[in-house]
Image (cartoon, rainbow, N blue to C red):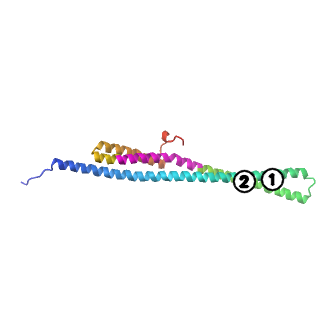
Amino acid sequence: MAEVELPKMEELAELKTRAFDKRVALSTSIFAVILAIASLGGNHATKEMLLSQQQASDQWAYYQAKSVKEHQTRTHRLQLEVDLAEREAQMPPKVRKKAEALLDQLTEEEKRYQSEKQEIEKEAKNLEHERDLNRIKDPYFDFAEVLLQIAIVMASVSILADTPAIYHFSIVLASLGGFLALNGYLLLVRIPFLQIGH
C-alpha cells in the first residue's frame, strides 16, 4: 500500500493564514471601491449644492431687477393716472386717448412683471430646495468616507496582527460606511445627528 504523506501542522497554519490574507485583501478591495463611490457622491453633492446656491442667487437678483422695473412702471402708471384725473377736462381728446393707451400699456407691463416675478421666484425656490437636498446628503458621504477609510486600515492591521476579530470589526465599519454612502444617494433614513445645521 502506498504511503500517504500527511501535511505538517506548520504548512496547514500557513495555508490557513494565506486564505485569511486573501479574504482580507479581497474585502479591502471592495471597501476601496465603495469608498470611491462614496467620494464621488460627496463631491457631486458638494458641487450641486454650490451650483444650486449660485443659480438661486442669480434668480433672486433677476427677481429684484424685475421688482425694480415693476415698481418704476407702477410709479409711472400712478403718476399718469393722477395727471389724467387732474387734467382730463382740459386735455384734447387726441392727447387723452394717447395717455389712456399709455396707461393701458403700463398696466399690462406691470402685470407682466408680476407674472415673470412669480416664475422667477418659483425657479429660485426650486434651486434652493435642490441646494438644501444636497446639503442634507453631503454629511452622509463624509461619514461614509471616514468609516470606509478606517475599515481599510483596520483590515490591513488584521493581516499584520493575524487577528480575525479586527477584520470582523473592519467589516462592521465598512458596512456602516456602505449604508451611509447608499443613504447619501437615496436618503432612505434621516439620521438626526447628521442633520445639525441643515
Residue 28 versus residue 91: which sits nearer the camera?
A: 28
Rendered-image quadrant of the N terminus? bottom left
Query: Is residue 123 at least partly visible in the picture?
Result: no
Residue 21 versus residue 183: which sits nearer the camera?
A: 21
Disc 1 on helix, strand or loop? helix
Query: Is residue 180 at least partly visible in the picture?
Result: yes
Rendered-image quadrant of the C terminus? top right
156 left or right of 147 in image? left
181 in the magenta segment: no
- Judging by the rendered image, the residue that carries numbered circle 2 is 113
Q: CA distance from mark 2 to mark 1?
A: 14 Å
Disc 1 residue type?
His
Sequence-first tag of 2 and 1: 1
Mark 1 packing: few (<14 Cα in 10 Å), some, or many (20+)? some
Magenta-tinted stretch:
128-153
Going 52% across and 45% down the picture, which residue do you hit?
136
Disc 2 on helix, strand or loop? helix
3 left or right of 17 in image? left
Mark 2 packing: few (<14 Cα in 10 Å), some, or many (20+)? many
Disc 2 residue type?
Tyr
Going 72% across and 53% down the picture, which residue do you hit?
113
What x and y, as percent, mark residue 154? 34, 45
Going 59% across and 53% down the picture, which residue do you hit?
54
What x and y, as percent, mark residue 86? 90, 50
- Judging by the rendered image, the residue that carries numbered circle 1 is 76
2 left or right of 160 in image? left
139 in the magenta segment: yes
What x and y, as percent, mark residue 195? 51, 41
Report the residue that reaches farthest toward the left. 1
